[in-house]
Amino acid sequence: MNEFFAQGDKERDLGMNISPMFDRDNTMVSKTQGGFIDFIIKPIYAVWGEFIPELKVSERSERAIRKTRKKTCDDVRKMATDIMAASTQAKLKAKS
């Protein structure tokens, strides 16, 4: 991601529109990585798997990937919710 963000920084410095996934201030890395896997990696392996059977992704592996991704997303959502709740509590405490 560092290369993407560096390019986004350069685009910002030049006054250009920042390319999708290249804006360090508005990019969710976990979501970007999932998209990269879905739209770049998996199609490549699907084609390679036609010629090199050992590279074909099994349905079992696919299910494991989906399960892991869902758990990771759920964990990130919970962590963000916890952080927001703690931040709100700290602000309320500071006001009182």
Image (spheres, rainbow, N blue to C red):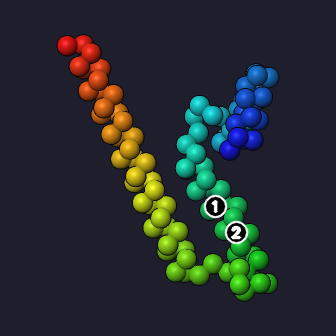
Q: Is residue 15 left or right of residue 70?
A: right
Secondary structure of the residue carrying numbered label 1: helix
Residue at x-position 24% and y-position 13%: 95
Numbered mark located on residue 43 in the image: 2
User: Could you tell me which quadrant the C terminus lies in?
Assistant: top left
Q: Is residue 15 left or right of residue 84?
A: right
Residue 12 pos. (x, y %): 73, 25
21 or 83, nearer to the observer: 83
**Which sits earlier in the primary sequence, circle 2 or circle 1?**
1
Secondary structure of the residue carrying numbered label 2: helix
Residue at x-position 68% and y-position 44%: 1
Residue 39 pos. (x, y %): 66, 60
- Of badges 2 and 1, nearer the viewer stands 1
1 or 16, nearer to the observer: 1
Residue 83 vertical placement versus 52 (above, below)? above
Numbered mark located on residue 50 in the image: none
Q: Quadrant of residue 80?
A: top left
Of the residues shown, which amino acid type is indicated by label 2?
Pro
Residue 92 vertical placement versus 11 (above, below)? above
Q: Is residue 18 left or right of residue 34?
A: right
Of the residues shown, which amino acid type is indicated by label 1?
Ile
Residue 30 vertical placement versus 55 (above, below)? above
- The residue carrying mark 1 is 37
Residue 33 pos. (x, y %): 61, 53
